[in-house]
Image (cartoon, grey):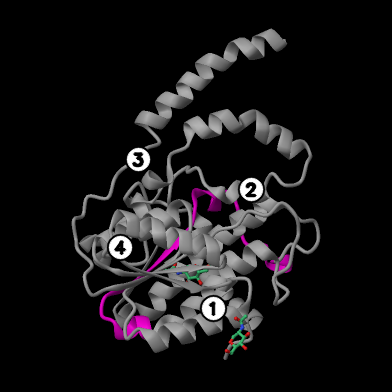
């Protein structure tokens, strides 16, 4: 039995490697558009996809704001970007998406410092293996990935409206499939299932996009969501912190995961495409994967759910 497992490893690893090289790498953003004079915010941009996205936008001449919680890591990221492009206009602004007050302070500072906002990339993610609450008492994954970004977008919407042809980009995931919103216990207070909560938050991102499109397309705002691909990121660190069966499985699959997944640089391509390509403006409200429009689940296209989620989010965040 054990021998069989060991013998099967090399071919699996080879397959994983080939898939990584030739399949998972995915499409690249082809647009050469410059972003001089444009202002972009990328949440969760001190590493991974967010970092690669910020770097690319900065190279195209945009003013890029790294909206992150960890000052030290974000300042290192600013340095790294400046090493690649000394004249990059890249700045750190502190933002803790798990804290309403921090989001409010952040948006106030942005509105004071910048007269426009062309691109808002809601990228920050979180995978948590246990039930935790944010400062405002929301379950952490739903609180950060959905409610935090909802509130941020809400506070910045006037600035986005005033900059013509602005874009809101939600980094979702194919993980949104096979899932629906658990309306009767949206925070999963009873019977916490971490991945299910992650999936729900990613579905919420798409529903949010749908509703944003409906509400703001006449204001010159384009809203899209996307699947970045199967990417190596730091997101797993929360997943593995609690020792248990999950950790053992994770350890076993880790080599395949490393080989089969792509580097953040490739994982950022669809996000970059949505931020810069011309055709996005005509394709408002869509879901992207591999730098082109893709199908999302039926649940994610349900306009009743998107309306209901919007109203519930306003209520939870105590706005209006
Ligand atoms: C928000 O700004 C206020 C006023 O400057 C400050 O007192 C408060 O500590 C800030 N809160 C957070 C979470 O950054
Ligand atoms: C992005 O996701 C957030 C949180 O789910 C949502 O509030 C927002 O409307 C979404 N925006 C877009 C463009 O999808
Ligand atoms: C959405 O809501 C309307 C009105 O309540 C209802 O008639 C319709 O069947 C619902 N659609 C879906 C897909 O649930």
Q: Residue at x 60, y 77 (%)?
A: 313
Is 218 colored magenta in this rendering? no
Cα separation, mark 1 vs mark 2, equals 26 Å
Cα–Cα gap, marks 2 and 3: 25 Å
Question: Secondary structure under badge 4?
Answer: helix
Q: Earlier in the sequence, mark 1 or mark 2?
A: 1
Residue 172 coordinates in the image, percent (x, y): 48, 57
| Sequence-first tag of 4 and 2 | 4
Residue numbers of the magenta segment: 159-186
Mark 4 vs mark 3: give the one in front: 4
Quote the CA–CA distance across marks 4 and 1. Answer: 25 Å
- The residue beneath circle 2 is 237
Name the disc covering residue 58, or none: 4
Q: Does the numbered disc 4 mark a residue whose Cβ is under 8 Å from ligand 2?
A: no
Would residue 45 be visible to someone looking at this image?
no
Disc 1 C-beta below 8 A from ligand 2? no
Q: CA distance from mark 4 to mark 3?
A: 22 Å
Q: Nearer the viewer, mark 1 or mark 2?
A: 2
The answer to the question of whether label 1 and label 2 lie on touching residues, with beta carbons closer than 8 A, is no
- Dot 3 crowding, Cα within 10 Å, few <14, some 14–19, many 20+: many
Foreground label between 4 and 2: 4
When asked about the image quadrant of residue 246, the answer is top right
Which residue has dot 3 on it?
26
Q: Quadrant of ligand 1?
A: bottom right
Q: Is residue 116 left or right of residue 230?
A: left
Q: Considering depth in this image, is 319 or 97 the residue closer to the camera?
A: 97
Q: Is residue 143 left or right of residue 86?
A: right
Q: CA distance from mark 4 to mark 2?
A: 28 Å
- Beta carbon at label 2 within 8 Å of ligand 2: no
Instruction: Give the numbered dot on residue 296.
Output: none
């Amino acid at each position: 039995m054990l021998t069989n497992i060991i013998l099967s490893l090399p071919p699996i690893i080879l397959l994983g490697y080939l898939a990584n090289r030739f399949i998972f790498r995915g499409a690249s953003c082809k647009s050469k558009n410059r972003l001089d004079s444009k202002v972009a915010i990328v949440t969760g941009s001190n590493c991974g996809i967010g970092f690669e996205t910020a770097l690319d936008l900065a190279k195209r001449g945009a003013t890029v704001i790294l909206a992150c919680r960890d000052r030290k890591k974000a300042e290192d990221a600013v340095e790294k970007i400046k090493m690649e492009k000394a004249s990059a206009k890249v700045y750190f602004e502190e933002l803790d998406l798990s804290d309403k007050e921090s989001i409010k302070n952040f948006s106030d500072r942005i509105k004071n410092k910048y007269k426009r906002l062309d691109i808002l990339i809601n990228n920050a993610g979180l995978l948590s293996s246990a039930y935790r609450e944010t400062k405002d008492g929301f379950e952490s994954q739903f609180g950060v990935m959905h409610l935090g970004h909802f509130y941020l977008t809400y506070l910045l919407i006037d600035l986005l409206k005033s900059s013509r042809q602005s874009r809101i980009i939600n980094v979702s995931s194919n993980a949104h499939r096979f899932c629906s919103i658990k309306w009767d216990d949206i925070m999963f207070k009873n019977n916490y299932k971490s991945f299910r909560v992650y999936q729900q938050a990613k579905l919420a991102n798409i529903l949010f996009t749908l509703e944003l499109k409906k509400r703001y397309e006449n204001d010159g705002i384009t809203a899209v969501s996307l699947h970045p691909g199967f990417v190596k990121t730091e997101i797993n660190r929360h997943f593995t912190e609690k020792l248990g069966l999950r950790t053992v499985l994770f350890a076993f699959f880790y080599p395949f995961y490393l080989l089969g997944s792509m580097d953040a640089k490739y994982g950022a391509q669809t996000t970059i495409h949505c931020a810069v390509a011309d055709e996005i403006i005509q394709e408002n409200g869509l879901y992207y994967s591999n730098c082109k429009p893709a199908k999302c689940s039926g649940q994610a296209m349900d306009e009743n759910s998107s309306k209901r989620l919007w109203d519930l989010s306003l209520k939870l965040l105590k706005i209006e």
